Image (cartoon, rainbow, N blue to C red):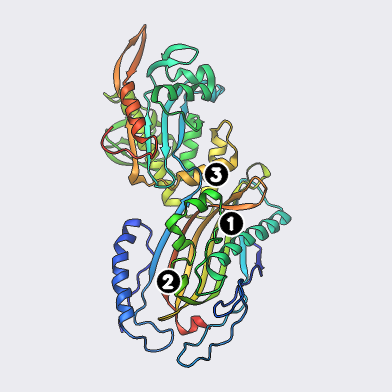
Amino acid sequence: VAAVALALAVTGCTGGGSSDGPRGDALPDRSVGAQPRLTAKPVPTEVTVGKVIGGKLSRTQRRRLETQVARLVSRYFDAAYLGGEYPRRDFSGALAGFSSGAARGAGKDRTLLTNAGIGTTTRVVVPRTKQVRLDVLVPRHRVVGLTARVRLVFVRQPTDGADERVTVAGRLLVNRKASGSWQIFGYDLKRTAVPASKGANR
Amino acid sequence: MSRLTQHPVRAASRLRRFVPLAVVLATTAVLVPPASFSEAPAALVKVESVHRVDVSDRVVWVLLLGSDAREGQSVTHSRADAIQLVGFNTRTGAATAIGIPRDSYVNIPGHGRNKINASMYFGGPELMARSVGDMVGIRPDYVFVTSFWGFARMVDAIGGIQVTSRYAFTDPNKPGGFRVGKNKLNGIQALVFSRTRKAFAGGDFTRSANQQRALVGILNQVRRSEDKPGFMERGTLTVLNNMYTPNVTPAEIYRLAQAAARVDPNRFSRCVVGGSTGYAGAASVVYPNIGQARSIANRVRNDATLEGSC
């Protein structure tokens, strides 16, 4: 299985700046009494194709699929968790890659599907791992849908309290829109937060 | 310093039990000052989960038909041996199955009164959907038809099912017979379980109830396996290869399959339309309780949730 590391939408540490988008490495906060600010390094989205059911994918098809889905998932991760300016209030565009019904119906799920529930109490978010594994349905030589098994790990530095290592893992259900682009039409995700060890922050 | 680790849980009930514990521990964590940067007083793990599949904002109604076509016969223009109208609510995970006895004597649009299962013989799945819609009062959004062997293959493809039988009965395909309680079945055995009628005093009604028990078995098996890589894709392919699905694209079936897999087996209500048996000419028929059928339909139409009994 070919593993493609796509440096898509590399998201850095956010917080304390003035730009709207994600930032690169941040400088440590030198203010008296403040916790050391986390620093971020680029984290690529690693995408692999797992099971291919019902047909075959040519190398070109596989590459294209990996690239397209990596872009979809990476944009979601960035808009929902990693990007923006923390402390952050606005998560209104976080589910832009979802089908209209999935986004509309998300309701209270948004507190887990995004950092909306903790955005205002978060000082910094630093990505650690972005992994995607695709199980693809290819009946009659056409990809009609796929399951993206995702694992996102980031460290969250709250405005008050100890750092957390947050893992968002599970399944994103993906199909094509009429326009041909991909969308997330379903999700089954778990979010786990544990105290971050010192090692995890480096 | 104490160290408590809660591993990820799956069942929502366990999650609900865990949440108060998490709140207590989180409060404790806040009250105890951290020893140093990034060190927490307890290794508290907080796990939360969400799931949803976008198919429709309203209940999706699917008419599941088991054709009695033999080898060489048209699956979609034979009589329907199994007739189950299933609605599922993708927002809540609730579902209701309304079983219709095969011999229900009803009006078939354009063909007068006859057994409802003759609708498919006269006009394929489309006419069958109209007959069921007229009888129950809910017009299905989708019609899926499978054959005996197609059903058996689908059950085998998901690794067999477990059903809970109310009655003990024998069949050469099930060594030791079917026993009261739980039975692990392969495809052929599941087919026998869903088709057997004469062994029961309840005849057609018991058979329809057993078909619903088989549906629950399928759902449980899917829920157990849906996390396995490729399982839902393989399952969808099996449906594509073994079911006739008029006017539905493979992409739509994939989406429906993912949505159906989110049905909570504990919220799956089941009813078989009652009635009395008799004769129409020389034919043994069931005179269905149309009032009951429509009453059930009206109660579950909008949310697929049945409060109370059938």
Task: Tell whether A77 sits left or right of B42.
Answer: right
Q: CA distance from mark 3 to mark 2?
A: 32 Å
Residue at 34% x, 26% y is B293
Which disc number belongs to residue B254? 3
Label 2's element? strand
In the rendering, at what x and y percent does residue B302 appear? 39, 37
Residue type (three-letter) at the residue carrying disc 1: Gly
Task: Tell whether B227 sits left or right of B165.
Answer: right
Which disc number belongs to residue B64? none
Which quadrant of the figure contains the N terminus of chain B? bottom left
Residue corresponding to mark 2:
A193
**Chain to which mark 2 belongs:** A
- In the image, residue A176 sits, relative to residue B166, either above or below, namely below
Label 1's element? loop
Residue at 61% x, 79% y is A41
Residue, far bottom: A32
Which quadrant of the figure contains the C terminus of chain B? top left
Residue corresponding to mark 1:
A97
Are discs 3 and 2 both within one chain? Answer: no
Q: Which tag is nearer the camera, tag 1 or tag 3?
A: 1
For residue B116, which quarter of the picture?
A: top left
